[in-house]
Image: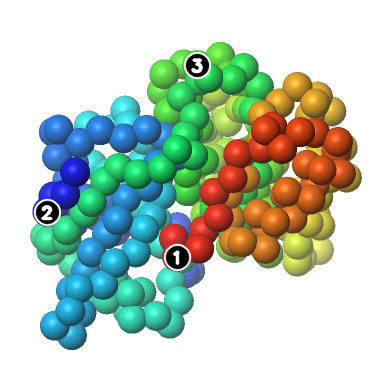
Amino acid sequence: MKFSTQLIEIIPRTEDVSSFRFNKPPNLTYLPGQYLLVFLKSNGKEIMHPFSFSSNPTEDKFIEFTKKFSNSEYSSTLKSLKNGDTVNIDASYGDFVFTGQFQKICLLAGGIGITPFWSICNYCSEKKLTTDIILLYSNRNESDIAFYEELKQLQTKNPNLKVLFVLTQANSTWSGLTGRLNSDLIKNQVPDYKERIFFACGPPIMVDAMKNAIAELNLPKTQLKLESLIGHT
């Protein structure tokens, strides 16, 4: 579905990550984990990037995507948008979705790869699904964690959701998990890993590492669903 819509809110998530909310067309449907194509005008041409929905389908007033800014033309153009500006969107795409089809899942997120999982976790909470969810969310340091407070709050509302933050460059005040997402960390933090379906989303190098981790855990490839963020950021 292709449509034009207006920007209604920009929400800073970290120093270099922001969420962009737009009016939701009444006839738009999507599933948690899917993505949209966002077209912007820059220097007389149209430029496009795909983004996972960071809103969830139970929201009826807005759709949202979340961007980690870089030095790209697209980032600069997106930063210049103001409330009321119009963009063109094409949605919805992708089969990296979860709507309750498994009883136990483990979500493996790297950096901005949290976006589809934020949608999925909110959807499961709003729908009061009984799915047992463990989210392992890796970042360099505490200030890089998008949706940090929101995820902690969501965890208090959903007794079936467990959120574990993992830092690769933690400072001395960090009391949580440290290191990289790998098979040892999964084995230690997810003792029933053999019973879970894994979803991994993040930069290509992280997604490849999760493929290796699943192999090292002697789990079949079918137990891992992947979304690599090539172009999504």
Distance from disc 2 to disc 1, alpha carbons, whole Å, reads 22 Å
Q: Against 64, is 163 above or below?
A: above
x%, y% of residue 152?
57, 38
The amino acid beneath tag 1 is: Gly
Residue bearing mark 2: 4
Inspect this view and state whether residue 166 appears: no
Q: Is residue 95 left or right of residue 178?
A: left
| Residue corresponding to mark 1 | 231
Of callouts 2 and 1, which one flags the residue occurring earlier in the amino acid sequence? 2
First-in-chain label (3 vs 2): 2
State the CA–CA distance, disc 3 to disc 1.
Answer: 31 Å
Circle 3/circle 2 CB separation < 8 Å:
no
Query: What element does badge 1 sit on?
Result: loop
Instruction: Pick out the residue farthest to the bottom.
Output: 43
Up-down relation of residue 66 to residue 73 (above or below): above
Q: Residue at x 16, y 49 (%)?
A: 2
Residue drawn 26% across and 46% down? 91
* Residue that carries the numbered disc 3 in the rendered image: 129
Q: Position of residue 167 (x, y in %)?
A: 73, 57
